[in-house]
Amino acid sequence: MYTLGIETSCDETSCAVLKDYKVLSNITVSSLKEHKKYGGVIPEIATRAHLKNIDSVVGAAASEAGVSLRRIDLVAVTHKPGLIGALVVGLNFAKSIAFALNKPFIGVNHLYAHFFAPFLDGKVRLEFPFLGVVISGGHTEIYLVNDFDRIRLLGQTRDDACGEVYDKISRALGLGYPGGPVIDRLYNFKCKDEFAFKCGRIGFDLSFSGIKTAVIYKKIELDKKGALDKETKVKLVSSFQYTVVNTVVKTIIDAAKKYKVRRIVCGGGVVANKLLRKILQKAQHQENLECFLSPLSYCGDNAAMVAGLGFYLYNKRGVKSTMNLGEAAN
Ligand code: KG4
Ligand code: ZN
């Protein structure tokens, strides 16, 4: 079966074609450059970029897969959460294709799609239950997943998302946007204890705004003393990253233990982080857990994960109406 997936929840216009779970194409065009000077995504700009790009992105995905739109059996699209104007572009484009071709149409929750990513291409066997973890620019959430339509939220950030804090700290230090990859690159293990930062945690909830403020205040203090050179910035971001990553991993492991699940499945932009991947992989052996991390190519927003989850849900429950999100709206 061929599934066409469409993703437009933030600044990536993405379209993928899957044959069952095999990714035949996954084309993503980002408006990232247009947001750079603002240090964050501007919804209006993202929406207009989706409008401009979606037609050619969908065409490119079909042509790279060698599958004409007529041969598509199912259309899957992110319907939430995300920037509303941005979502509307993808949702209506997907509906139009489904309507014109008279094909079933299914709405997919973007967050659940993030932790579907490790199952693409049949690399990992889908077995329940597992802990589904999303760590991205907009979300930091831990779920107990008994199936993709039986998901329970166990913990989430109470304020900023993890990636958002990477971006804000990077901006404050003049290191560029998006901050995650920059800080990941600058991280130096030897500098991890240079500054004593704390990352907030309440049960399985997390709080990142305190550490963000602490890093920014420290930066201001150092700047006033004329001591904010490149080396000091590396020390700041290394201490920040070490603290945040360890707190996030500890929270995930504690949740896995409390809910007695051995499998942990992680997706989202921040899951590309080298330190996070290393610590989670190490924890597998120490804690007798199995960690499935999204491949780097599917960590950021992409339509392949949306198509994959759409196909899974379609197989499980079908769709009643071509145009109605209906029960998919979970
Ligand atoms: O999943 P994603 O592409 O978009 C959202 O749905 O939010 O995540 C983007 C976020 C940004 O905040 C970015 O700074 C962060 O992921 N990110 C990283 C890394 N690569 C991207 N954070 C830490 N380390 C990275 N290597
Ligand atoms: Zn995302």
Image (cartoon, rainbow, N blue to C red):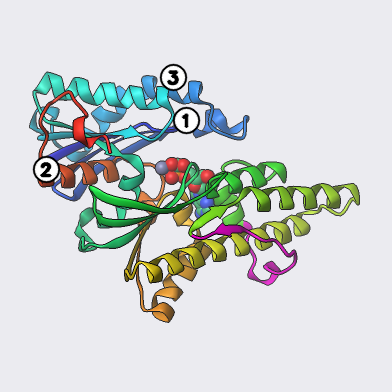
Regarding residue 320, the answer to whether it shows in the image is: yes
Which mark, residue 31?
1
Please state which amino acid type lies under the numbered disc 2: Arg
Where residue 197 sits: x, y (%)? 70, 61
Q: Residues within 10 Å of mark 2 (few under 14, many from 20)?
A: few
Q: Residues within 10 Å of mark 1 (few under 14, many from 20)?
A: many
Please state which amino acid type lies under the numbered disc 1: Ser
Q: Quadrant of the C terminus?
A: top left
Question: Which SS type dominates the magenta stretch?
Answer: loop
Q: Tag 2's secondary structure?
A: helix
Q: Nearer the viewer, residue 201 or 247?
A: 201
- Is residue 59 on the magenta stretch? no
Where residue 50 sits: x, y (%)? 39, 24
Please tell me which of labels 2 and 1 falls first in the chain: 1
Where residue 89 sits: x, y (%)? 34, 22
Residue that carries the numbered disc 3 in the rendered image: 48
Q: Which residue is found at the position 18% from the left and 50% from the top?
A: 22
Marks 2 and 1, how far apart at CA? 35 Å
Q: Which residues are magenta?
A: 186-203
Q: Tag 3's secondary structure?
A: helix
Q: Quadrant of residue 34?
A: top right
Regarding residue 24, the answer to whether it shows in the image is: no
Marks 1 and 3, how far apart at CA? 9 Å
Q: Nearer the viewer, residue 163 or 181?
A: 163
Q: Which mark is nearer the camera, 3 or 2?
A: 2
Residue that carries the numbered disc 2 in the rendered image: 317
